Image (cartoon, rainbow, N blue to C red):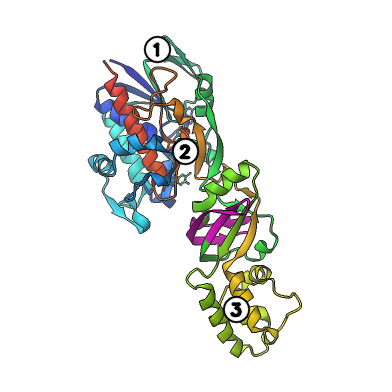
Amino acid sequence: MKNIAIVGAGASGLVCAITCARAGLKVDVFEKHTKPARKILASGNGRCNLLNKDTNICHFHSQNPSFVLPSISVFSFSKCLDFFCDIGIEVVEGEKGRLYPRSLCSSSVAELLFYECKRLGVGFEFGCEVLHVQSANEKFALHAEDKKLIFDAILIATGGMSMPSLGGSQSGYEFAKKLGHSIIETAPSLVQLESSDKTIKEASGVKIDANIEIYVENSLHVSSRGDVLFADYGVSGSAVLDVSRVASVALQERKNVKAKIDIMPSFSKEELRVLLQNRLKKTNKKSVSMWLDGLINKKLTSLVLKSSSLPKNIFSSDELTAKDMTKLAFGMKNIEIEITGTKGFKSAEVTAGGVDTKEVDAKTMMSKKVQNLYFSGEVLDVDGDCGGYNLYWAWASGFVAGHSMAREKA
Ligand SMILES: Cc1cc2nc3c(=O)[nH]c(=O)nc-3n(C[C@H](O)[C@H](O)[C@H](O)COP(=O)(O)OP(=O)(O)OC[C@H]3O[C@@H](n4cnc5c(N)ncnc54)[C@H](O)[C@@H]3O)c2cc1C
């Protein structure tokens, strides 16, 4: 019987282990931490957003975007639901088509995946960091601490660099490089954005529903509507995470990145101008910031005044003119901040970039360079949008790798 080593007991490694073991292969999983599935446990704020109803390919990113197609066709939405139902997980739909375990506990997913592995006889070595992987004569030598073990096939499912505290590491890229693979430059994604703009500090702690647009070299690249949270360092929140990949990659390429935030996304500029004009009837000698209070959070006033380019010498709202209302309406819908960095891999949910997918067979996940070497999950140059796409990629690619290892078992 063919014996398989899986490096990494994360989302992808566990699904691959189950798939191989169900096909009768002997499987050993090596995990540097003392427990499996740490990122699954942390996912979806402890609820695990494991899939999305909308599985359109546009939600996945790679230098080679069509690479994901065979995996998500084979491990389709319904196949994925069946897989989880089979191990005991019912799902429930949340906002934006996001699916969660009905228990709303990520631990259900982690524990039931691990239980299924154990039930099928998968071997686990925890607290065992794989240090080198060598290939010779279509076999692999796996070096872990003081051990050297030989396998017929190996899956690198070591994930990306994000959140080292939850297992993020570069080791998969190192193994891949030594085995002849190229790496697409990595960048943090689904990550908070930093700004050197000092005015933003005054807004720290404010969380609003807003629209955020990212401009790279002054051209609009991406936008998202949802929560925007202002912080000392910059901006965070679900809408920011959605657009962060574009900003992060552009910063990596040393391009100029700006964010434009519309803090009144439910109003058109004209509706807002009329609203402000009506408020001019009740200024009662209030300061401009007090006059705006009640319409916007007070902590946002400086940012709004700055982006409205109102004369700095206006202190009383009585001095405001109809023309100023047009400027204020513009300012509220166009708060512009320079993006100077991201919070990096230590805070990012995923890693963009990774093992170049042009050197991996999309239908089997096997290396085109080394026979019986497989990759799956985040270690590959594939990352997804917020909304269950990263776990879906991990499950689907792990399943396809396992399935093709089983097909090759003869
Ligand atoms: C806080 C957080 C929340 C998230 N929420 C969601 C969500 O709700 N929905 C979603 O779709 N995605 C979410 N993600 C992303 C998702 O968790 C990952 O994309 C997914 O877990 C990747 O799966 P993987 O198997 O490729 O890697 P991982 O799950 O990271 O597993 C890799 C494993 O390999 C181990 N390892 C690494 N190097 C070695 C080595 N040399 N030797 C032995 N073991 C090694 C690691 O310890 C780790 O256990 C979230 C990520 C984070 C950090």
Circle 3 sits on which residue?
293
Residue 228 painted magenta:
yes
Q: What residue type is labelled 3?
A: Asp
Give the vertical position of 158 relative to 219 (above or below). above
Between 387 and 66, the residue placed more toward the observer is: 66
Residue for badge 2: 62
The first of marks 1 and 2 along the sequence is 2
The main secondary structure of the magenta stretch is: strand
User: Of residues 298 and 107, which is closer to you in this image?
Assistant: 298
User: Which kind of residue does numbered mark 2 sit on?
Assistant: Ser
Tell me if residue 198 can be seen.
yes
Image quarter of the N terminus: top left
Segment tinted magenta in the rendering: 212-239
Alpha carbons under labels 1 and 2: distance apart:
29 Å
| View extreme (top): residue | 137
Q: Which mark is residue 333?
A: none
Disc 2 Cβ-to-ligand 1 distance below 8 Å: no
Per the image, label 1 sits on a secondary structure element best described as: loop
